[in-house]
Image: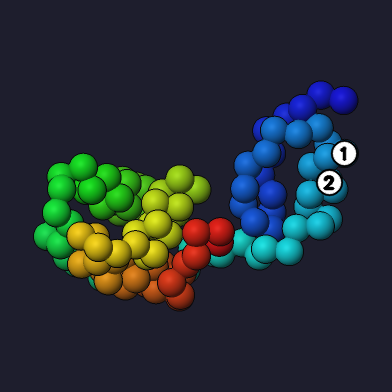
Amino acid sequence: MEATKQQCPKCAKLFILDEEAFSKHVASCTRPKTELQNFRPDDLRKLIADFRSDVKRSVDDKLADELEDQLLNTDTPHLKAETKQRLARWCKTGGIYSDGMEVAWKISRLLFGKIIERVD
């Protein structure tokens, strides 16, 4: 069997598996996909601005850039799995990043109705 790249409809993870192995994963997958909710763009813009002002290093702006590009600067808002994971990491951090973490919680609640986990 030939391996193809497919996304699990339950957990949204990408796999490169043959059809039989992928079907086994889907059948046994227990993690529901966390869906992007409808949100008010102005609310997200404000939270992104808050996040930018709270982060300490310019490299940490990457999450804000990705959120703007994928959700605000497009006619078809979507969130890539990598960006969702980056947001999840910001939701579960600490130390010098704790200020950004609190804003990440607010962004997560706005977009998903909850604070997402690293495995959502």
Residue 41 locus on image (x, y percent)? 29, 64
Pick the residue in front: 54 or 42. Answer: 54
**Above or below: residue 93 compared with residue 7:** below
Which residue shows up at 70% across the image and 33% down it? 16
In the image, is 25 to the left or to the right of 86? right
- What label does residue 23 carry, if any? 2
User: Which of the 4 image quadrants contains residue 40?
Assistant: bottom left
Of helix, strand and loop, which one carries label 2? Answer: helix
In the image, is 56 to the left or to the right of 28? left
Q: Residues within 10 Å of mark 2 (few under 14, many from 20)?
A: few
Residue 67 locus on image (x, y percent)? 32, 52
Q: Is residue 75 visible?
A: no
Q: Where, quadrant-wise, is the C terminus in this rendering?
A: bottom right
Residue assigned mark 1:
20
**Above or below: residue 79 compared with residue 91:** above
Q: How many numbered marks appear? A: 2
Residue 119 locus on image (x, y percent)? 56, 59
Which residue shows up at 25% across the image and 63% down it? 95
The type of residue carrying mark 1 is Glu
* CA gap, disc 2 and disc 1: 5 Å
Residue 57 locus on image (x, y percent)? 15, 48
**Above or below: residue 107 compared with residue 73:** below
The type of residue carrying mark 2 is Ser
Which residue shows up at 23% across the image and 48% down it? 60
Which residue shows up at 44% across the image and 54% down it? 84
